[in-house]
Image (tube, rainbow, N blue to C red):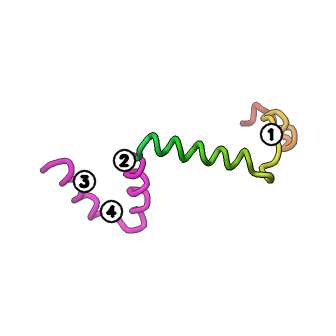
Amino acid sequence: MSNRELCEKLLSNVPEYKIGYVLAYLQGLTADEEADDAFCAQLYQEYMNAPERGEFVSLEDALKECRVSPDEI
C-alpha cells in the first residue's frame, strides 16, 4: 500500500469534528511560499495603514499596566 493510499484510508477514519485540523495541516503542507509571503505582506500593510491600530506598547509597559512581574511570565 502506498503512502497516499494509507493516508486516504486513515482519513476515512477521522471523525468529522477533526477534519478541520487535517485540512489546515494539509493546506500548510501544500502552501505556495511566495503566495503566503505576499498574503502576509498585504496583511502587514493593511495593519500599518489602519487608523484604529493603536499605539505600540513595550513589554515592560504592558507588564507594569497589568501589574505583572517579568519573573511571573
For label 2, the residue is: 30
Which circle's residue, 1 or 3, is located before the other in the chain?
3
Which of 17/2 is in front?
A: 2
Residue 53 to residue 56: above or below: below
For label 3, the residue is: 7
Which circle's residue, 1 or 4, is located before the other in the chain?
4
Q: Measure the alpha-carbon separation of dots 1 and 2.
A: 34 Å
Q: Measure the alpha-carbon separation of dots 2 and 3.
A: 15 Å
In the image: residue 73, left or right of residue 43: right
Residue shown at 80%/52% (left/top)? 51
For label 4, the residue is: 14
Based on the picture, tell me whether residue 25 belongs to the magenta stretch: yes
Residue shown at 43%/57% (left/top)? 21
Q: Nearer the viewer, mark 4 or mark 2?
A: 2
Q: Element at badge 4?
A: loop
Based on the picture, tell me whether residue 67 belongs to the magenta stretch: no
